[in-house]
Image (tube, rainbow, N blue to C red):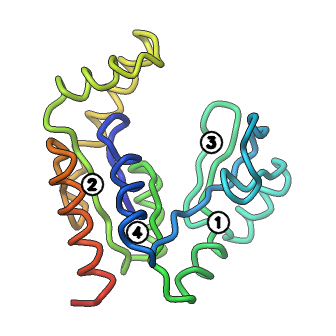
Amino acid sequence: MISGPSGAGKGTLVARLVSRINRLWISVSATTRRPREGEVEGVSYFFLTEEEFLRLVEQDGFLEWARYAENLYGTPRDAVMSHISEGQGVVLEIDYQGAVQVREKMPEACFIFIEPPSIAELERRLRERGTEDEHAIDQRLLAARMELSHKEEYDMLLVNDDLDQAASELEAYVLHELNGS
């Protein structure tokens, strides 16, 4: 389970991790939003109606879930457990609130927090993306401060200052956990 603020480099590190360790599966989330062009059912997301999603919530079918804006998002329990039972390591890239829910249901899971070297660097990365306006950047920085205040609750803290070094440290930690050493 990997968390960290938007712009910390979680997606890049997870992509490198999965390319280096073939026993890993990146969890696919469920959502009630409509598919975007090019998104594939079961690969990009599991696309559900709100009724289907809420039925799964009632049946404890999610390891974690939340409402963002007008849509629901969650990690389907059955898909994760199926991959675990096949001997695969499962990577969940989720926010702090999701991590709290997963820890309640799977306390044996490994919880990794990816952090930027500084808030100033995080802001630079967010601005460099060029995908958000000032308000959105301010909101992401506010959320980052909240998430960073909880980093000590994780099993591993990883500062993503040097991408190659961070990727190597993450790979070593995950291999150690997968091998039970």
Residue at disc 2, secondary structure: strand
Q: Residues within 10 Å of mark 3 (few under 14, many from 20)?
A: few
Q: Nearer the viewer, residue 152 or 120?
A: 120
Residue at disc 3, secondary structure: strand
Q: Earlier in the sequence, mark 3 or mark 1?
A: 3
What separation in Å lies between label 2 and label 3 (alpha carbons)? Answer: 22 Å
Left or right side of 99 for 42: right
- Identify the residue at horizontal 27%, vertical 90% (top origin): 180
Q: Which mark is residue 67?
A: 3
Q: Earlier in the sequence, mark 1 or mark 4?
A: 1
Residue denoted by label 4: 103
Q: Amino acid at mark 1?
A: Pro
What separation in Å lies between label 1 and label 2 (alpha carbons)? Answer: 21 Å
**Residue 26: horizontal and vertical position, in percent?**
51, 63
Q: Are marks 1 and 4 in contact (CB under 8 Å)?
A: no
Q: Is residue 46 above or below residue 111?
A: above
Q: Nearer the viewer, residue 162 or 73?
A: 162
Q: Residues within 10 Å of mark 1 (few under 14, many from 20)?
A: many
